Amino acid sequence: MHSMMKGFVVTGAALFAVIVPSSAQAQSQSRLCDVDQVGVFENRIHIKCVPIADKAYTKDIPYYAMRIDKPKAVVDGIIALAVGAKQTRKPLRIWFDFGDYKRVPGCQGNDCRRLVAAALE
């Protein structure tokens, strides 16, 4: 589900919606993620995805992280979607910036990318 609202894209499923700036989503890539781990830290959240056999970069880049200084609704929504995906074993659609890891504390260039948005499909 996508709809434009005052320069934001609303993406979500069921009762949850994740709001991100439309420009951020337009510049990002997406993938399906079988959630292996959901982490909440002092300065970031992260999702660890199970590697996809035929996509080599998913083995090299299992972590997708977001600073927690984003709006509370975005951070809480992504956590809820990721936990829901893990519990129901449904794939989570994540949008990420493949070229950016430096803006997220604790995100290393060799295994992590900046998480932009998520939707439970």
Image (cartoon, rainbow, N blue to C red):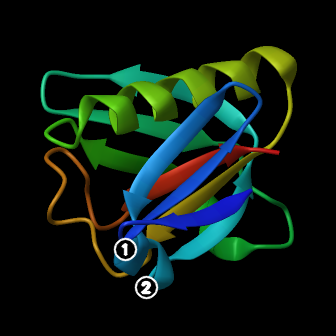
Q: Amino acid at mark 2?
A: Gln
Residue 19 x, y percent position in the rendering:
44, 49
Judging by the rendered image, the residue that carries numbered circle 2 is 27
Q: Taking 67 as reference, is 65 left or right? A: right
Quadrant for the C terminus in the image: top right
Between 37 and 79, the one lying in front of the other is 79
Quadrant housing the N terminus: bottom right
Give neighbour class at mark 2: few <14, some 14-19, many 20+ (Cα, 10 Å): few
- Residue 101, above or below 49: below
Q: Residues within 10 Å of mark 1 (few under 14, many from 20)?
A: some
Q: Is residue 116 above or below residue 18?
A: below
Element on which disc 1 rests: helix
Q: Does residue 21 appear left or right of residue 51 in this picture?
A: left
Mark identifier at residue 24: 1
- What's the residue type where badge 1 is placed? Ala
**Direction front: furthest residue:** 6
Q: Position of residue 105 (x, y in %)?
A: 13, 47
Q: Residue at x 43, y 77 (%)?
A: 98
In depth, the one of 1 and 68 nearer the eye is 1
Instruction: Write the residue at 28% across / 74% down.
Output: 100
